[in-house]
Image (cartoon, grey):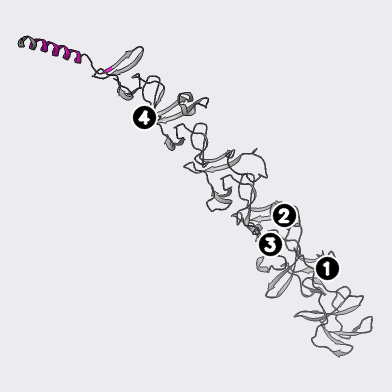
């Protein structure tokens, strides 16, 4: 009995061994779908397996090889079930539930390990691309609107004309209005747009030797821009710059309407301004406060700028040194000092004769037989034929109604009978045959200068 039982047991063991040997691990087709059978005979599910080509494939929860599907929201298998790696893949959004409401396809980039690049930047073939949290390549404004990716996904570099991001605030109006709502932006070599980092509303950047201005969103500005302090009441023309339609900071002469914020301070709707090599407008002092040291020479010509940044014209009082001052007359067209004898309309509308030296300085003293004070011709007033006029630091001279200096050692008489005697230079010596020395007679008439 025991011997027979042993024979039966050996036969069963051999049969069992033969059955186990028949389950060779590998791929096969079942009902038109690839499956992977383990050595135990069980199907591989929810795991990766390599094929004979040494490429990875994925078996889903039913044991079937997945095709055209995402795996773990990170990997993707193509129509042949092969895991996509080391390259681009355009995928129908319908195959990825995250984009179920997106009609079309999106581009993805899969790394060497098969994982999609997600929520980061990646440099591919010398171009930077940005991928969202689901791995889709992005276009347009990305990464807090600090970068812009073109239709091919590559981050822009250099200058580009773009519409602003929808969620950014109001922009300063473009006075040239040539770009139909678009603005120029500048992106550095990494693709990041330039924005001022000084905490101000506007900032300048020098690009290829030229200064440009950008707002806090990075949009290039044109026209007048206050690049200085933006605090209330602090505005002055010195804190402004002017940028032409191409955004370049102006240098040299330019005729323009003043900034809107300052327009009420100006005499004319359009004024002349001069901008230095850095785009800074030349600004001087208020009328009456300037001195000869404030003159500016540009291309061999002399100008005087006021506190509004304009080259002045008309009569202006200019300090020579200390409390001493004189008059300069600037031509309204050329804005340069006038020389020689000229009839001038003073600030109060009255006309008078002036004489200016070759330097432009108003003449004080006797010139050409006439008496001048700070350029203004001095005349006998109130119908007098003769009148003594005292010129500070020069003495008292006798002049007639035409402004001529009277030189008479024998004396002349005025209409009221007063007798005046002068020396050969016209200085007063005697009045009614009595010697006079010093003293102030009628003070010289001062010019009426412009006050703005």
Q: Is residue 9 magenta?
A: yes
Counting residues from the start of the chain, the first of labels 3 and 4 encountered is 4
Give residue 42's position: percent from left, percent from top. 27, 19
Counting residues from the start of the chain, the first of labels 4 and 1 encountered is 4
Q: Nearer the viewer, residue 47 or 270?
A: 47
Q: Is residue 395 magenta?
A: no
Q: Which residue is mark 1?
A: 353
Q: Which residue is mark 3?
A: 307
Counting residues from the start of the chain, the first of labels 4 and 2 encountered is 4
Q: Nearer the viewer, residue 22 or 251?
A: 22
Q: Which mark is residue 263?
A: 2
**In which image quadrant can residue 354 be found?**
bottom right
Q: How far is mark 4 from mark 1, CA to CA?
A: 93 Å
Instruction: Provide the residue span drawn in magenta.
Output: 6-26
Q: Nearer the viewer, mark 3 or mark 2?
A: 2
Q: How far is mark 1 from mark 3, CA to CA?
A: 28 Å
Q: How far is mark 3 from mark 2, CA to CA?
A: 14 Å
Give residue 361's position: percent from left, percent from top. 73, 69
Q: Residues within 10 Å of mark 1 (few under 14, many from 20)?
A: some
Q: Which residue is mark 4?
A: 114
Give residue 240's position: percent from left, percent from top. 63, 55
Q: Give left or right: position of 344 versus 4.
A: right
Q: Give left or right: position of 45 versus 431.
A: left
Q: Eyeballing the image, is 36 above or below 186?
A: above
Q: How far is mark 3 from mark 4, CA to CA?
A: 68 Å
Q: Are marks 3 and 4 in contact (CB under 8 Å)?
A: no
Mark 2 lies on a secondary structure that is helix
Mark 4 lies on a secondary structure that is loop
Q: How far is mark 1 from mark 2, CA to CA?
A: 34 Å
Q: Nearer the viewer, residue 320 or 308?
A: 308
Q: How far is mark 4 from mark 2, CA to CA?
A: 64 Å
């Amino acid at each position: 009995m025991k011997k027979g039982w042993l024979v039966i047991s050996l036969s069963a063991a051999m049969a069992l061994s033969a059955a186990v040997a028949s389950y060779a691990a590998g791929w096969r087709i079942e009902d038109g779908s690839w499956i992977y059978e383990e050595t135990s005979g069980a199907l591989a599910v929810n795991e990766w397996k390599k094929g004979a080509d040494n490429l990875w494939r994925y078996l889903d929860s039913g044991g079937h090889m997945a095709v055209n599907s995402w795996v773990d929201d990170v990997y993707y298998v193509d129509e042949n079930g092969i895991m996509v790696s080391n390259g681009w893949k355009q995928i129908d959004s319908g195959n990825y539930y995250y984009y179920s409401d997106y009609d079309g396809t999106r581009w993805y980039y899969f790394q060497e390990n098969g994982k999609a690049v997600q929520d980061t930047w990646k440099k591919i073939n010398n171009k930077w691309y940005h991928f969202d949290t689901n791995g889709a390549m992005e276009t347009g404004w990305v990464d807090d609107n600090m970068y812009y990716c073109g239709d091919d996904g590559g981050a822009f570099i250099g200058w580009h004309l773009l519409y602003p991001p929808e969620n950014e605030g109001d922009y300063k109006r473009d006075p040239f209005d040539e770009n139909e709502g678009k603005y120029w932006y500048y992106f550095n070599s990494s693709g990041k747009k330039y924005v001022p980092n000084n905490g101000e509303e506007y900032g300048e950047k020098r690009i290829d030797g030229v200064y440009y201005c950008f707002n806090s969103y990075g949009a290039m500005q044109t026209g007048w821009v206050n690049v200085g302090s933006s605090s209330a009441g602090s505005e002055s023309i010195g804190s402004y710059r002017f940028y032409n339609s191409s955004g370049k900071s102006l240098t040299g002469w330019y005729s323009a309407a003043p900034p809107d914020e300052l327009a009420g301070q100006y005499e004319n709707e359009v004024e002349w301004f001069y901008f230095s090599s850095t785009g800074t407008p030349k600004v001087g002092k208020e009328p009456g406060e300037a001195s000869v040291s404030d003159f500016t020479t540009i291309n061999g010509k002399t100008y005087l700028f006021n506190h509004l940044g304009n080259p002045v014209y008309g009569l202006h009082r200019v300090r020579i040194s200390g409390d001493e001052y004189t008059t300069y007359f600037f031509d309204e067209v050329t804005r340069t000092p006038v020389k020689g004898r000229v009839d001038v309309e003073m600030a109060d509308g009255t006309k008078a004769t002036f004489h200016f030296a070759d330097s432009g300085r108003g003449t004080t003293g006797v010139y050409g037989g006439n008496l001048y004070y700070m350029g203004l011709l001095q005349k006998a007033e109130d119908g007098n034929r003769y009148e003594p006029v005292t010129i500070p630091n020069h003495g008292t001279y006798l002049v007639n109604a035409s402004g001529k200096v009277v030189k008479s050692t024998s004396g002349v008489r005025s209409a009221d009978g007063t007798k005046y005697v002068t020396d050969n230079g016209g200085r007063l010596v005697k009045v009614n045959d009595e010697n006079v020395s010093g003293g102030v007679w009628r003070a010289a008439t001062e010019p009426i200068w412009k006050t703005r």
